[in-house]
């Protein structure tokens, strides 16, 4: 699936600031935007557009719905900017809005209960960013592992998937994940642990030659 | 080794390897149309906020105290006007309609000095008041002119008007 990413909106991962510094800068940017600085919003948007979109896409598992939710989340940020108070990290604020939008979406569509729903096109046909100089067998193994990880991620219960995505995409810790999802820290930690355990298992199975051979025979 | 710590260490190792694998996945980004829409929405909202701020130069939080101050000033002005204004000065005067017809007629007949107290109850311009000495001089002139009857009538009226003058003065 081709993704047209405007260069001006894609911060290079190598140039990304330290998490604590970035969180503080995000709060400053949001306060500047609240006070009327549109440039601050553009910077903030460029920083969070990718993680937010991937969180929504992999959480709701539907590209059209993810696009709608993505727009809704930013619309809410824009609409409520005058009332913004820096009580937590900006990422916590942003992903809390995203969580609420996703919950509303699940309620509307009734998709929250379908754990084993058919995979979205994004999951079925990933575009592995494999260097071309790698050998074909390595390439195949790499693609296999990616597919396995995406499939395992899609198969996770929504709460565990959300906890994992929040941890990986927004860089939030247990406390912030708990705050975003409105649960206790122990619950958030438990969800994250289960998610990691299941994903690790799927990765191991994808790497295991015995499992591969069993799969090959099955096909 | 503490099994709980061992479990935590295992989780951290698993988490790190899963995290590495996850971040090697393709990273889909929002389509450009979404970027355009969101940034356009931000610009529109900002422009609307600026327009609203220009339209209302006086902030709403200042309007209530201003309105209160204006009300107090207006009330004070009204009270001052009622106490010291021209209406208050006229309040002591009565309308000509309140003056009895008989008193009004008597006033025109009576000499100026007699009706001096009644002038408070009429809005007609006060008649020129004749001083006692001038009145007596006029009576003396009438007598000198041989108009004794008229002089006697005027003198009777003078004595009615100024009884104390008659007692104190030798005539």
Image (cartoon, rainbow, N blue to C red):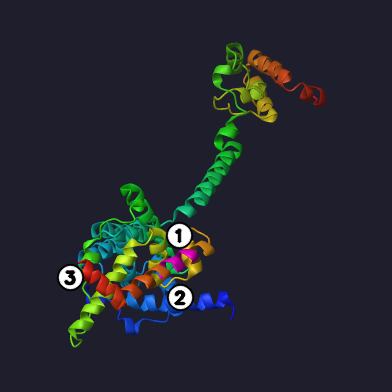
**At 37% across and 70% down in the image, what residue appears?**
A199
Front-most of residues A202 and A156: A202
What secondary structure is marked by label 2?
helix
Check disc 3 and report its element: helix, strand or loop. Answer: loop
Q: CA distance from mark 1 to mark 3?
A: 31 Å
- Quick check: A112 above or below A191? above
Q: Residue B7 at what x, y percent from top left? A: 52, 75
Are circles 1 and 3 on residues that touch, CB within 8 Å? no
Most frequent secondary structure within the magenta stretch = helix
Q: Position of residue B57 (x, y in %)?
A: 39, 58
Marked residue chain, label 3: A
Instruction: State the mark number for residue A24.
Output: 2
First in sequence: mark 1 vs mark 2: 2
Task: First in sequence, mark 3 or 2: give its number.
Answer: 3
Residue drawn at the location 36% of the way across and 79% of the way down:
B20
The segment highlighted magenta reads: A190-196
């Amino acid at each position: 699936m081709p993704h047209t990413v405007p260069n001006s909106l894609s911060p290079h991962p190598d140039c990304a600031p330290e998490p604590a510094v970035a969180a503080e800068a995000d709060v400053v940017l949001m306060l500047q935007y609240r006070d009327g600085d549109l440039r601050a919003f553009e910077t903030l948007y460029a920083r969070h557009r990718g993680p937010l979109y991937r969180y929504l896409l992999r959480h709701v598992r539907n590209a059209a719905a993810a696009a709608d939710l993505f727009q809704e989340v930013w619309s809410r940020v824009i609409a409520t900017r005058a009332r913004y108070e820096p009580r937590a990290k900006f990422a916590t604020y942003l992903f809390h809005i995203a969580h609420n939008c996703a919950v509303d979406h699940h309620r509307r569509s009734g998709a929250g209960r379908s754990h084993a729903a058919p995979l979205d096109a994004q999951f079925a046909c990933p575009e592995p960013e494999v260097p071309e100089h790698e050998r074909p067998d390595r390439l195949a193994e790499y693609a296999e592992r990616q597919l396995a990880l995406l499939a395992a991620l899609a198969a996770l219960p929504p709460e565990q998937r959300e906890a994992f995505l929040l941890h990986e995409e927004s860089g939030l810790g247990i406390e912030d994940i708990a705050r975003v999802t409105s649960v206790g820290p122990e619950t958030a930690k438990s969800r994250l642990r289960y998610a990691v355990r299941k994903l690790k298992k799927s990765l191991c199975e994808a790497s295991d030659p015995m499992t591969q051979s069993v799969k090959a025979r099955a096909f | 080794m503490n099994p709980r710590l061992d479990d935590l260490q295992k989780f951290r190792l698993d988490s790190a390897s899963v995290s590495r694998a996850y971040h090697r996945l393709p990273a889909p980004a929002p389509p450009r149309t979404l970027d355009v829409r969101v940034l356009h929405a931000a610009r529109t909202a900002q422009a609307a906020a600026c327009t609203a701020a220009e339209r209302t130069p006086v902030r709403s939080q200042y309007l209530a105290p201003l309105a209160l101050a204006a009300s107090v000033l207006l009330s004070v002005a009204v009270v001052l006007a009622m106490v010291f204004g021209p209406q208050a000065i006229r309040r002591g005067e009565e309308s000509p309609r309140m003056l009895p017809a008989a008193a009004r007629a008597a006033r025109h007949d009576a000499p100026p000095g007699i009706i001096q107290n009644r002038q408070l109850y009429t809005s007609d311009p006060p008649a020129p008041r004749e001083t006692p000495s001038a009145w007596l001089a006029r009576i003396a002139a009438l007598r000198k002119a041989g108009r004794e009857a008229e002089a006697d009538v005027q003198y009777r009226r003078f004595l009615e008007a100024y009884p104390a003058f008659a007692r104190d003065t030798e005539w």
